[in-house]
Image (cartoon, rainbow, N blue to C red):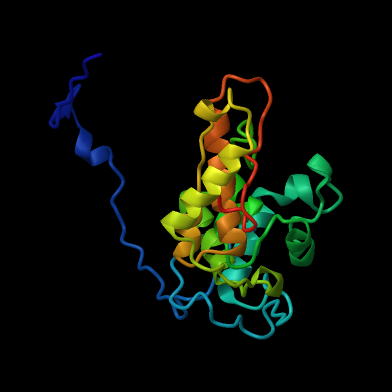
Amino acid sequence: MAMACSFGEIDGTDGFNDVDPVTNTPTPAVTDPGAPVVTPGGGSTNNPVTNPGAPAPVGQGFDADDPFQSTILGQQVKGIIEQNCAQCHANGAKSGDMDYITDFESLVKNGKIVPGVKEDSQLYARMVQNSMPPAFQRDQRPTFQQIDQVGQWIDELPGLASDECEPVALMTSDEQIQAMAEDTAKLDVEDQPFTRYLTVSYSSNAGACGRELDRQRYALMKGINSVSTETSIGNPQPIDKNNLI
């Protein structure tokens, strides 16, 4: 489709005379650039926060015991969640048997938030995957920057004491080969040529442990099943005491 435009007279009239004059409205100064700005829908805007970990001002919903209320970033994240998730998961709504989207303790208890690890937090992961809010929900969705804010907030939360761990002793290549040889000797002769071993010792030897190492194991399991021709999901069986091979 072609469109012709003329910047002169149209039908004998001067088009410029019909245009309303532009008036310059001064922009109000921002007295506190770090304060959250609330949109009409109840959520925070994406304005950068100069010090997101700073305590929220007392008297503005401040609660030192609630991570949703104890910092400026926490208050912004709660606004994002209320605007995009609460209609299905709070205030009496219980979609997917979940009605605690704004209750921090319940989110942690049920594994929706893993303090200090956004990648293991379902709340953040589902947002990144665009599976929550559901795809059919198009009128109200979090922006990419709002999702980043949620991830930043989770990463800055103090980790749980139960997540503390100590790396296991370094496992040398010779020790790994020895463990594989001993396990192979236990197999049927027909199965030995087709047996393969995978290891996460590279991660363990680098100091990974606990949840971080479990993430490596899960990725391995998922990778193996993605190329399998079987109809059921299989879980690789470890052959050593530290579950590295």
Q: Does residue 2 appear anywhere in the picture?
A: yes
Nearest the viewer among 116 and 64 is 116
Residue pictured at 52% horizontal, 64% vertical: 208
Nearest the viewer among 180 and 31 is 180
Q: Does residue 141 appear anywhere in the picture?
A: no
Q: Is residue 148 above or below residue 125?
A: below
Percent across and percent down for residue 100 are 80, 56
Residue pictured at 74% horizontal, 59% vertical: 107
Q: Give the farthest residue toward the bottom.
A: 58
* Residue 167 as seen in the image, left or right of residue 49: right
Q: Quadrant of the N terminus?
A: top left
Percent across and percent down for residue 182 are 57, 45
Residue pictured at 51% horizontal, 74% vertical: 52
Q: Give the farthest residue toward the top.
A: 1
Q: Give the farthest residue toward the left.
A: 8
Res. 159 image quadrant: bottom right
* Residue 13 as seen in the image, left or right of residue 211: left
Res. 23 image quadrant: bottom left
Q: Give the farthest residue toward the right.
A: 92
Residue pictured at 56% horizontal, 53% vertical: 244
Percent across and percent down for residue 22 are 29, 53
Q: Is residue 1 above or below residue 226?
A: above
Percent across and percent down for residue 102 are 74, 60
Nearest the viewer among 125 and 70 is 125
Count of numbered circles in the view: 0
* Residue 235 as seen in the image, left or right of residue 178: right
Q: Is residue 165 above or below residue 144?
A: below
Nearest the viewer among 65 and 210 is 210
